[in-house]
Image (tube, rainbow, N blue to C red):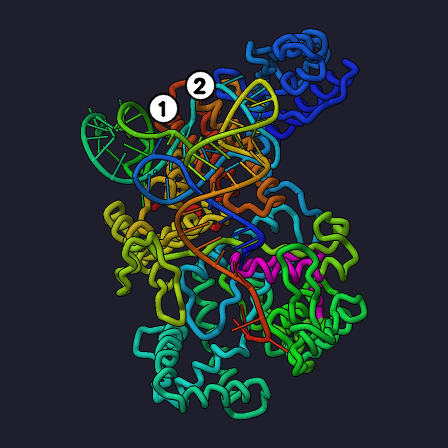
RNA sequence: GGGCCCAUAGUUCAGCUUGGAUAGAAUGGCUGCCUGCGGAGCAGUUGGUCGAGGGUUCGAGUCCCUCUGGGCCCGCCA
C-alpha cells in the first residue's frame, strides 16, 4: 500500500508545482530509476522543455527550488525524504525509508488481504474458460487455457470482483458422435484397459475412429445417424451419448481439479439448443436490425450480420435452410452471460470440488432445481471475459461487436461500462521438434508443430503432471530421507502442480509456448518451485527463532524497523511494498503474468537477503526482532502473491 | 488477395500500453561458495548489428511507415 502512497504523493506534488508555475500539466511518468539515482524519478522537466524553451535541467532545478523544497519543509510527515535534480534533466526523489518500512511491514503483518486492492467494487465478472469438448482428455494446450482462466479468476476475486466461472460443455457435436460410433459400432471395448482414464481412452478412440472412417464408409454413415439421434435427444443412442459425455466430463474435471482449477457452473450446449434461447436472441437481432435477410447475392436466403469494418465479410447467421451456424449458436450463450435474454435454466448441485466449493450445472428440469434458496445468480455479468485461443479472435470480435450494439454502447469506446464483453485470447501451445519426434513425427527443419487431438499428436495433461511429480519425488526424497513416502508424494505433487502452473502463466499471452517434455521438467531458476523454496526458507527461520512472538506487531516495535538499513533489507521492504500496485495492474489489464513476474522478483530479492543478512545469528536482539518481522512480512506477501497464481506455499520441501 | 499476432544473448523469455540515465532475467558453457538461517540457493564469467530499412523526436528496443522471415484466421463446417 505504501509504495502507492509514495507514488501518489509524488505525482500530486509535481502536478501542483507545475500548475502553480502557470503551465499546462503535460503527461509525465513517475518511475523507479537505477538505484544510484534514488527511489523514484520523474521526467516532467523533459516534457516541459519544449513548452518553456529551456533546458530540462534548469526546469528541474526551478521546480525543486521554488516548489518541492518548500513543500517538504512544510510537510514533515511526507513519505518523500529529499529531492534532487540530475544533470540529464530528471527529478530524483528519495523516500523516507523509515516511514516506508514501518507502514509497509505493519500493513503486511496485520492485513491478511495485504496486496489485494479493491479494484472491482463488487463488479459481477463472468469468466469462461477450459470448455474442452467432452470426447477426450486434456492436453497441454487445454492446460494453458484452464490455468490462465483460473489465475485470472483468482486475481479478479482478490480485487473484489464478484466472479462467476463458467465451463462450457459442447455435448452435442460430431466429436461426441465419434465416440459413440467407436463404442457401439466399431467394436471397441466399453472399458479402458487398467490404469487408463476413461477420457484418455476415448481420446484414443477418437483418433482411431477418424482413421477408420476413411476406409469404412458404413461407419461414416453410422456417424450421421448417431448425430441425428443426439440432436433429437429422445432415443437410446442419445441417452448413451449423454452417459458417455458425462463420464468423460467427470474425468476431465478430475484433471482440472488436480491443477487446482475450479468452476462455479457447467453450461451444456445441448440445453442451450433446446431452451429456445436462440430463437429469442434471433428476435433481438432482427428487432435491432443487426440481422439482415439477404434477397440477393451469394448469401441469398440467409440471415447475415453485415460487415462493419474493413477486411471483414458479411457473416452468415442462419442458412438458407433455416438452420443456425456455429457462430450464431454462440450468440445466445454470450447474450445469456450478459443477461440480455431471459434465463431459461434451473440449476442443480453437480458436485463438490477440491476446494470445498459447489460446482453447479444447468438443467431444464425444474424439479431438479437446487437453487431456490439463495439463487446463485450465474448470469447477468457486468463484465464478461471469455478465454479462448486466438484462432477464434475473428469470431469473438464479431460476437463482441454484436453484443455491444445490443447493449447500446460502442464497444470500442466503452460507452457502456456496465456491459462489457471481452475475448481474452492467447497463442497456441505447440510441440518442440524433439517432443514431436518422441510422438513419432519428424518435422524436419521446423521449430515446432501444432498439436492435433484428431491425429493423436498431443501431450496429455496428466502425463505431464505425473512426469513432473516423479521428478519432484526424487528431489524431495533425497532431501528428506526420513519422510514417510505418503508425505513425499503429497509434497512432490504440490511441487509438480506449482511448476506447471507457473510455467503456463509466466509469459505473455501472445507468445506461442513451444512445449518440450524435457525442458518442462526443470525445477530450477525461473520456476514455480523457486518461489516455494524461498518461502520454505523463510519459514525455517521463523520456526527456529526462539520466541515466535517477537514478530507480533503489537509489541510496538515499529521504530525498530529503522534498523533494517542494509541495501538488502531496503530492497526487500520496497519489493514487499509493491504488491498491491502489481495486483491492481494485473486485474485492470487482465495480465496474470505480471503477478508471476512479481512473485519471482520478490523471491529473488529475499534469496539475496537470505544470503547476505543473518537473522538468527544476529547478536543485537532488537535488530534480530526487526529482521524476523521482515522475514515474516516477506512470507505473508509472497504467500498472497503465490495464491493468485496457484503456487502452493510449502513449509518444507 | 484481405485481416490479426510474433521477431531482443546459443536457447526460452522480461522490458514496448505511458519514448529518457550503462538493454535485464532464466537456461546452457566455464569458475567459485555448504563445520554458517535449507546449495531446488548465491556470486563471478561467457554471451546482444533489440529481424532489415526509412521516418518522427533533443532522445527510439519502445511511436509511425515499408520490407523480410515465421505463425494464425478469412465456409450456407464446427
Q: Nearer the viewer, residue A320 or A545?
A: A320
Residue B76: percent from the left, percent from the top? 59, 75
Q: Nearer the viewer, residue A124 or A400?
A: A400
**Image-based side of A139 in relation to A315, left or right:** left
Q: Earlier in the sequence, mark 2 or mark 1?
A: 2
Residue under label 2, please give it: A566
Residue A178: percent from the left, percent from the top? 44, 81
Residue at the spot 52% in from the left edge and 56% down from the top edge? A390
Which chain does the numbered disc 2 sit on?
Answer: A
Placement of A256 over or under B69, stated as above or below: below
Q: Which residues are magenta?
A: A373-402
Q: Which mark is residue A612?
A: 1
Query: Is residue A313 rendered magenta in the image?
Result: no
**Image-based side of A66 in relation to A629, left or right:** right
Which chain does the numbered disc 1 sit on?
Answer: A
Residue at the spot 73% in from the left edge and 16% down from the top edge? A17
Total number of numbered discs in the rendering: 2
Image marks 2 and 1: residues in contact by CB distance under 8 Å: yes
Amino acid at each position: 500500500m505504501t509504495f502507492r502512497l509514495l507514488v501518489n504523493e509524488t505525482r500530486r506534488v509535481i502536478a501542483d508545482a507545475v500548475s502553480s508555475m502557470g503551465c499546462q500539466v503535460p503527461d509525465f511518468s513517475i518511475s523507479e530509476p537505477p538505484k544510484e539515482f534514488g527511489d523514484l524519478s520523474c521526467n516532467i522537466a523533459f516534457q516541459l522543455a519544449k513548452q518553456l524553451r529551456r533546458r530540462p535541467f534548469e526546469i528541474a532545478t526551478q521546480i525543486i527550488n521554488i516548489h518541492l523544497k518548500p513543500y517538504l519543509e512544510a510537510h514533515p510527515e511526507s513519505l518523500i525524504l529529499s529531492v534532487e535534480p540530475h544533470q540529464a534533466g530528471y527529478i530524483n526523489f528519495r523516500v523516507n525509508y523509515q516511514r516506508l518500512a514501518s507502514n509497509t511491514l505493519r500493513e503486511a503483518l496485520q492485513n491478511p488481504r495485504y496486496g489485494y486492492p479493491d479494484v472491482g467494487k463488487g463488479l459481477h465478472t463472468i469468466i469462461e474458460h477450459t470448455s474442452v469438448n467432452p470426447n477426450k482428455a486434456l492436453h497441454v494446450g487445454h492446460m494453458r487455457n484452464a490455468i490462465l482462466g483460473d489465475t485470472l479468476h483468482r486475481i479478479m476475486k482478490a480485487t473484489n470482483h464478484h466472479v462467476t466461472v463458467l465451463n462450457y460443455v459442447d455435448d452435442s457435436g460430431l466429436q461426441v458422435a465419434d465416440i459413440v460410433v467407436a463404442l457401439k459400432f466399431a467394436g471397441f471395448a466399453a472399458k479402458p484397459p487398467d490404469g487408463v482414464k476413461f477420457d484418455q481412452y476415448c481420446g484414443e478412440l477418437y483418433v482411431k475412429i477418424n482413421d477408420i472412417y476413411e476406409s469404412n464408409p458404413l461407419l461414416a454413415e453410422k456417424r450421421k445417424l448417431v448425430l441425428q439421434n443426439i440432436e433429437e435427444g429422445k432415443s437410446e443412442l442419445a441417452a448413451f451419448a449423454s452417459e458417455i459425455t458425462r463420464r468423460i466430463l467427470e474425468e476431465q474435471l478430475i484433471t482440472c481439479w488436480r491443477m487446482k482449477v475450479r468452476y462455479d457452473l457447467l453450461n451444456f450446449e445441448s440445453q442451450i439448443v433446446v431452451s429456445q434461447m436462440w430463437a429469442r436472441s434471433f428476435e433481438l437481432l432482427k428487432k435491432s436490425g443487426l440481422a439482415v435477410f439477404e434477397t440477393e447475392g451469394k448469401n441469398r436466403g440467409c440471415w447475415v450480420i453485415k460487415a462493419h469494418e474493413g477486411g471483414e465479410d458479411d457473416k452468415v447467421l442462419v442458412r438458407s435452410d433455416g438452420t443456425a451456424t456455429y457462430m450464431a449458436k454462440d450468440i445466445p450463450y454470450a447474450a445469456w452471460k450478459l443477461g440480455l435474454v431471459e434465463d431459461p435454466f434451473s440449476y442443480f448441485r453437480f458436485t463438490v470440488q477440491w476446494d470445498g466449493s459447489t460446482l453447479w450445472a444447468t438443467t431444464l428440469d425444474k424439479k431438479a432445481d437446487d437453487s431456490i434458496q439463495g439463487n446463485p445468480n450465474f448470469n447477468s455479468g457486468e463484465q464478461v471475459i471469455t478465454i479462448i485461443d486466438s484462432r477464434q479472435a475473428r469470431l469473438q470480435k464479431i460476437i463482441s461487436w454484436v453484443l455491444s450494439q445490443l447493449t447500446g454502447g460502442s464497444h470500442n469506446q466503452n460507452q457502456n461500462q456496465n456491459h462489457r464483453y471481452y475475448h481474452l485470447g492467447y497463442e497456441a501451445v505447440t510441440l518442440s521438434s524433439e517432443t514431436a519426434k518422441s510422438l513419432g513425427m519428424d518435422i524436419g527443419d521446423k521449430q515446432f508443430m501444432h498439436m492435433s487431438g484428431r491425429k493423436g499428436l498431443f501431450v496429455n495433461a496428466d502425463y505431464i503432471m505425473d512426469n513432473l511429480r516423479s521428478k519432484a519425488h526424487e528431489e524431495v526424497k533425497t532431501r528428506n530421507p526420513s519422510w514417510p513416502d505418503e508425505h513425499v508424494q503429497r509434497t512432490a505433487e504440490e511441487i509438480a502442480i506449482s511448476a506447471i502452473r507457473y510455467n503456463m502463466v509466466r509469459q505473455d499471452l501472445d507468445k506461442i509456448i513451444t512445449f518440450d517434455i524435457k525442458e518442462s521438467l526443470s525445477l530450477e531458476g525461473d520456476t514455480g518451485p523457486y518461489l516455494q523454496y524461498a518461502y520454505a526458507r523463510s519459514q525455517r527461520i521463523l520456526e527456529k527463532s526462539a520466541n515466535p512472538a517477537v514478530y507480533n506487531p503489537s509489541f510496538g516495535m515499529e521504530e525498530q524497523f529503522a534498523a533494517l538499513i542494509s541495501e538488502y533489507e531496503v530492497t526487500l521492504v520496497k519489493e514487499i511494498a509493491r504488491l498491491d500496485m502489481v495486483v491492481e495492474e494485473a486485474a485492470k489489464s487482465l495480465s496474470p503474468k505480471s503477478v508471476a513476474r512479481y512473485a519471482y522478483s520478490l523471491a529473488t530479492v529475499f534469496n539475496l537477503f537470505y544470503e547476505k543478512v543473518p537473522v538468527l545469528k544476529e547478536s543485537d536482539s532488537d535488530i534480530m526482532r526487526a529482521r524476523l518481522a521482515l522475514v515474516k512480512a516477506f512470507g505473508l506477501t509472497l504467500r498472497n502473491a503465490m495464491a493468485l497464481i496457484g503456487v502452493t506455499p510449502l513449509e518444507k520441501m
